Amino acid sequence: MIEENLKHLHQLIKSACQKADRTPETVTLVAVSKRHSVEKIREAFATGQVDFGENYLNEALEKQALLSELGITWHFIGHIQSNKTRKIAEHFAWVHTVDSLKIARRLSSQRPAELPPLNICLQINVDNEDSKSGLSTDKSLLLNLAREIDTLPNIKLRGLMCIPAPKSIQEDELATFTQMKVLQDYLNSNDFNLDTLSMGMSDDLDSAIMAGSTMIRIGTAIFGQRQ
Ligand SMILES: *Cc1c(COP(=O)(O)O)cnc(C)c1O
């Protein structure tokens, strides 16, 4: 089942990439395994899925301990409380949900020296929703923050991430994701070299890939309903 779901998703990614005139290798599928068992993660890994996303730190740490022999690339995609940054800095390769200088500083100072720099994305509250965390879409605020973060030694700013509000028409999805691409291009025109846009889930991956997403995050369509 999981194998078929992954095959199907890779097919969807491939056809979205064809429409967008991109190669499928430019899009990484992050399998969101929150609230799913280690057995399911093993099953997905056995088919070649390497990147897994988790939202809840304690749950993630338990799974990582049970799966440590596999060589999984772990992504933290949940809300970050500042008292959790040490464990996040120690146990993940990527953090998608950084939205303040304070959190970035803590992650950098707590990243163990023997590990490569922690890859981070800045979460953008792209639809300006009260219910969601993330930075505003204001270009100059974002540039200033990115410049400060760029001075931190043990984290590497790779790009931007968003969780947009659901849209009923594809043009609206595309417009939102394009706004993210414009922000990335703006930073890159100011001496950054960001290669990552973490955006797109099951229902909007086509628009996300069209707009330049490089990481899509999908849970339910791989693993089924969460417990
Ligand atoms: C849970 C989650 C996903 C995956 O959601 P599904 O509906 O299970 O595909 C993707 N991104 C983030 C940030 C999530 O929290």
Image (cartoon, helix red, strand yellow):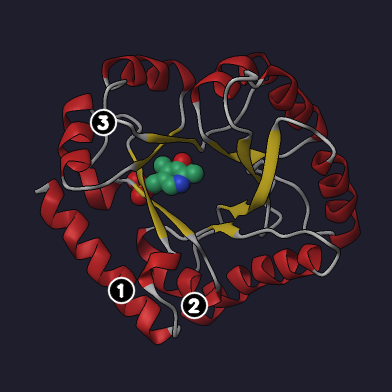
Whether residues under marks 1 and 3 lie with C-beta atoms below 8 angstroms apart, the answer is no
**Residue at the spot 49% in from the left edge and 69% down from the top edge:** 208
* Callout 3 secondary element: loop
- Give the residue type at disc 3: His
Helix, strand or loop status at disc 1: helix
21 horizontally vs 82: left or right? left
**Ligand 1 placement by image quarter:** top left
Q: Nearer the viewer, mark 1 or mark 2?
A: 1
Q: Give the number of the disc on residue 193.
A: none
The three-letter amino acid code for the residue at tag 1 is: Lys
Q: Position of residue 136 (x, y in %)?
A: 78, 52
Q: Residues within 10 Å of mark 3 (few under 14, many from 20)?
A: some
Mark carried by residue 210: 2
Tell me the CA gap for discs 1 and 2. 12 Å
Can the viewer see residue 204?
no
Please tell me whether residue 141 is drawn above or below residue 40 in the rendered image: below
- Mark toward the viewer: 2 or 3: 2
Residue for point 19% across, 64% down: 8
Residue 162 x/y as whole percent? 59, 54
From the image, which quarter does the C terminus lie in?
top left
The residue that label 1 is drawn on is 14
For marks 2 and 3, the one nearer the N-term is 3
Which residue is disc 3 drawn over? Answer: 36
